[in-house]
Image: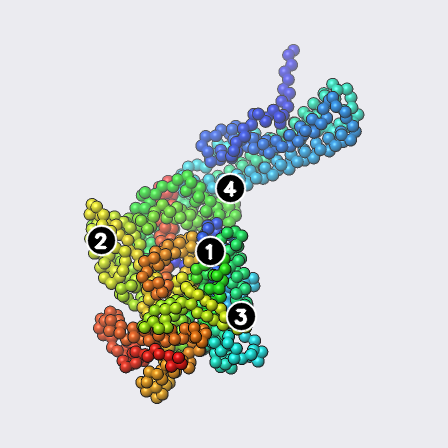
Amino acid sequence: MVSQSIREPESNQAANKAANRMASPSVVIGLGSTSCQIARRLDEVSSSWSFADRKSLGFLYMDTREATRGEISRSSRFIPLTLPHFSNLRDMRPWITECVPELKNLSLSREGALGTLANAGVASRFNYGNLRGHIDATIDQVCPYYEGVTYLRVHVIAFLGGGTVGALPVLLAALAEARGTSYNFSVVLHLVLPQRGMSRDPETTYPLQLRNAYSTLQFLRAASGVEVGKAQYTGKDSYDVTVYPDKIINAPGPHFDVALLHRSPKDSLPVQRVHVARILEGLVADAWGTGQDWWARYHETMREANNNADARFGSISSREVGLLEGFFVQTAKQYLQNQWRTQL
Amino acid sequence: MARFSFRRKRLSFSEMTNRVPAAVDPLDFLVGGRTASRDAFQQIHGAIHGTLGEVERSIGSVFERLRPDGNLSDRMVLEANAELRTELARANTFADVKRDEMLITIGSRLESLFIQRLVVAPEEEPPVRRWAALADRAIRRDLPVVSEPNHSNLDVSPNDRKKRLTKWQTETDEYLETVCLNHVGEVINGLLEELNEYSASWVELVVDLRRLATSGGRLYQEVTDAEQWTFDSDDPTVKNLLTGGQAQDIAMRILSRFQLSHQDLADIAEVVHGSLAGKPVYGSNRVDPLELQELLARATAQKIQSTVSIDTGFLSLMANGSRFGEELGELLVDMHMGASAMEEKMWRVGDVRVGHVDAASGVGITASNLHDSVLRGLGGGRKFAAVEGHPGDNHRFEVQMSTVGAPVSDLAIFRDMVNAWYAWHFEDVRGSAINGDPSGWLASVSKESWKLYPDIGEETGVRRAIIELIDDDLKKLWNGREDIATRLTNGSFTDGELMNGVVKPQDKIMNTADPDS
């Protein structure tokens, strides 16, 4: 039995370099350490793409860990979700109280699920100006207005079990505000699910990761306007968020076009990174192979969906195409063998 | 006694202008069929000659300024001399560049030819002898001396000046043609060197390939061993649909209809050439035969794949034989169990709106009982595009499913997530503080909610909406427990196992009225 390697053979890379993979420019935003590593992986993989494709692809990294800056390439845009010391902030300001009763309530732990989502929520509000600036600059970079391309896709990767995902509402608000400019873009959320085998302490940490995952999914469902029960409070897809220094941002929906739930085939961080990055690669490369096929199918499904809110959630998996590639290489070997055996 | 003169015919660039061909592609003889060596020589000659045309025109204008009936100053003669030397140097440079360009093109053309012939005509001798005669024409000549007349040489009567200018121009013309022919010779020598390496490598490589392809060879073993045709992946979402034997049958069927066009061959050669990243396919430092075989296979695979439309034909390639319907049913069962293994973990099975991504996509003309086979293979609860009836008792089928569109509550870990959320809020207080009082729950949730839901505004926040959602989720879990239990465990599920005892029957409905409001 032949096992298909995840890595593309080097000989193939040169052959593929000239191919045009991207029809729509894309910005990939990694939110949190896990997601930044996934985005970084795609960044590395795409380095062998053609110049035109690379030009249409931008990366933005956000994390509460300053150390993430050192793990990404020096030229990449990194937004540290950090706060100055509490003593330098005036407590009880709306942008703070909207998140936490008081700053002193914030846990100092920023370690994944052990920290609470509020840390990232407050920090993203504090860094909102920086966030908007980087989003605008990255969009402008991949989609120069003077070239006449005004449509792009934004892929946001977030590990649902972590703490940094608490910045997601603010990030979506920033994207909603950016959408109000001359650019038109769709947002694809890549939500990486927690897995028991990948938790450092499955008995303690994993339930907390699941809790975070659930609350973030609830937020996304509420923010996508799903109506449930008596629909007294659900059914609205816009919200306001107050950011530093007390500026109110209105975030009209829809906030995302599709949210994809990713689960690693193995309980291993490297496998998770490679797996999600590979699916992401397929979707970013929307003029090529699996991505081209998936987007066509997605639009077809969305057309037929009778519940737009829930239709935004889904999961995707690899097709058999990867195996078919092996089949065709083997078929080609058969062809060559036939030629050489009969003619030589 | 009669005297015979064997005086060498003078070379003339201007005379050759009308004789040499101006071919669009002077090296097309390398891939063409029946070009004689004389014509090949002429084409190379024409290419170099064409490069020097501009120099010839510039030299012509220099002599034009020195016409016999005009005034002539010392400075004019000096300038003409200097310009002429510059133009002759330029001629050498132009010819050098063109020669190098042609040598590079010859290298890549021969590499492409080498690769193409390996695929379609490995038995044919390399076309070396045909061009051997070119060697006789590659003669190196000494560059003639071009005189440098001064003012006194040319400041003479118009007739004398005319004669001297004509002589000077003739020398220049001969110089240009000599430069041209010397460079043609260098191109030919380069070509012959490449051909020698080509020929030697070809003979050696053909022996290697014969050894690989015949019984006992590595390639032979690779294609005959069914195990090599059985692919699997580390990724559990990827499931191979074919057994090794089936894959071999289909491959043979594809190859029986497969033919490579000239353009296909050129594309294959280009892909292989590009993949080698500068490593030659022939010569002393050439690529290893196994690596070359692998690259050829990959490039050829792309062509085979592009000629076989998967969406419209792959499964239909299997659509013959008496057991096809049953085989397809078995195949789809395999898909159900394998291709979607990962989604099995994530999504509940069998719900009306839940399916699996890309479980199958195929269109084919098949037997009328196919619909039943598909239904049986997938299980009745799946939603998939149906089989369309066609006249003549044939059916076109397409099976497409997607989890896009499935509600989040269908996640298999959904229950675990709700439990975790619930436990975090209530584990400590459930027994004592709330005592089954729903308002106590809400008070507890509200108090801690800022940690999980960085709230968004006092009035416009999503917290209340989230509480409404939680209520709905809990109801769904409770109401669906028997349905899930029946489906997943054939009725052997108990309440305790389903909800892990977290949610009690009396807790299943929460009052969504927010105590803060």
Tell which tag, 4 or 3, sits nearer the viewer.
3
Both marks 2 and 1 on one chain: no
Give the left or right position of residue B403, taking residue A184 as reference. Answer: left
Residue B255 at x, y = what percent?
33, 45
Under circle 4, the secondary element is helix
Instruction: Indicate the quadrant where residue A189 lies.
Output: bottom left
Q: How many numbered circles does the render carry?
A: 4
Q: Which mark is residue A181?
A: none
Residue B209 makes an appearance in the image: yes
Under circle 1, the secondary element is strand
Residue position for label 1: A151
Residue B128 at x, y = what percent?
48, 35
Residue position for label 3: A127
Q: Amino acid at mark 2?
A: Leu
- Mark 4 Cα-neighbour bin, 10 Å: few <14, some 14–19, many ≥20: some
- Per the model, the C-alpha gap separating discs 4 and 3 is 56 Å
Give the left or right position of residue A84, taking residue B60 as reference. Answer: left
Both marks 2 and 3 on one chain: no
Give the left or right position of residue A99, taking residue B506 as reference. Answer: right
Chain containing mark 1: A
Tell which tag, 4 or 2, sits nearer the viewer.
2
Residue A307 at x, y = what percent?
33, 63
Both marks 3 and 1 on one chain: yes
- The reply to whether the C-beta atoms of the residues labelled 4 and 3 are less than 8 Å apart is no
For the residue pair B108 and A208, the one nearer the viewer reads as A208
- Per the model, the C-alpha gap separating discs 4 and 2 is 52 Å
Chain containing mark 2: B
Residue position for label 4: B108
- Mark 3 Cα-neighbour bin, 10 Å: few <14, some 14–19, many ≥20: some
Tell which tag, 2 or 3, sits nearer the viewer.
3
